[in-house]
């Protein structure tokens, strides 16, 4: 239990709060941090909009199973490992950074065609239960050396 507001003045570069179900607060607390790794998976009581993270030098961002909101285009362009599984994040699949290597969009409502990811150095891709995406049937052929879940 607790509120992430207590992290406000800490000089964090990495923060793993995975499975802290009772943790409350707004992710805006990370707004001006030089945070590179942020794992908030299953922190189901945290609130906020991902646009508050857009200027962070994040490389790894895990928001799976949270109620955090926002649009995919607001993500920091530095992110290479992104997990948005089972979130309400909106937007088009063309918007993740082109440097993305690990992308989990399972059970999201994102739209678009996976063709827009063709130039990304994808190593792991999870598009399972993404009902609004086009081209999912081509994912394995598009990324033959990656772990692909459709």
Image (spheres, rainbow, N blue to C red):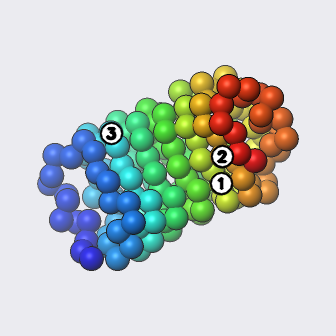
Q: Nearer the viewer, residue 13 or 31?
A: 13
Disc 2 crowd rating (10 Å Cα; few below 14, some 14-19, many 20+) is many
Q: Do the numbered discs 2 and 1 sit on residues whose CB atoms are within 8 Å?
A: yes
Q: Please say if 51 is above or below 59.
A: below
Left or right for 39, reference 118: left
Disc 3 crowd rating (10 Å Cα; few below 14, some 14-19, many 20+) is some
Q: Earlier in the sequence, mark 2 or mark 1?
A: 1
Circle count: 3
Q: Earlier in the sequence, mark 1 or mark 3?
A: 3
Left or right for 134, reference 92: right
- Identify which residue is drawn at 38% across, 53% down: 39
Choose top left, top right, bottom left or bottom right for residue 29. bottom left
Q: Position of residue 148 (x, y in %)?
A: 69, 39
Q: Please say if 38 is above or below 120.
A: below
- Identify which residue is drawn at 24% across, 42% down: 13
| Distance CA(mark 1)–CA(mark 3) | 23 Å
Q: What is the quadrant of the N terminus in the image? A: bottom left
Q: Which residue is mark 2?
A: 126
Q: Nearer the viewer, residue 121 or 34?
A: 121
Q: Which residue is mark 3?
A: 36
Regarding mark 2 in the picture, which secondary structure is present there? strand
- Identify which residue is drawn at 26% across, 65% down: 4
- Identify which residue is drawn at 63% across, 50% down: 105
Q: Position of residue 47 (x, y in %)?
A: 41, 68
Q: Nearer the viewer, residue 123 or 3?
A: 123
Q: Please say if 127 is above or below 81.
A: below
Which of pointers 1 and 3 indicates the residue nearer the eye? 1
Q: Is residue 96 visible?
A: no
Q: Which residue is mark 1?
A: 106
Q: Is residue 75 visible?
A: yes
């Amino acid at each position: 239990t607790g509120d992430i507001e207590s992290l406000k003045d800490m000089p964090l570069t990495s923060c793993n709060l995975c499975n802290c179900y009772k943790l409350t607060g707004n992710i805006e607390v990370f707004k001006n941090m030089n945070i590179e790794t942020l794992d908030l998976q299953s922190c189901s009581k945290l609130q906020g909009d991902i646009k508050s993270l857009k200027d962070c030098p994040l490389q790894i961002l895990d928001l799976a199973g949270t109620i955090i909101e926002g649009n995919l285009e607001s993500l920091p362009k530095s992110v290479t490992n992104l997990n948005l599984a089972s979130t309400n994040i909106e937007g088009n699949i063309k918007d993740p950074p082109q440097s993305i290597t690990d992308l989990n969009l399972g059970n999201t409502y994102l739209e678009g065609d996976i063709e827009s990811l063709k130039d990304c150095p994808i190593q792991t891709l999870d598009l399972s239960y993404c009902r609004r995406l086009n081209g999912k049937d081509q994912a394995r052929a598009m990324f033959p050396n990656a772990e692909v879940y459709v």
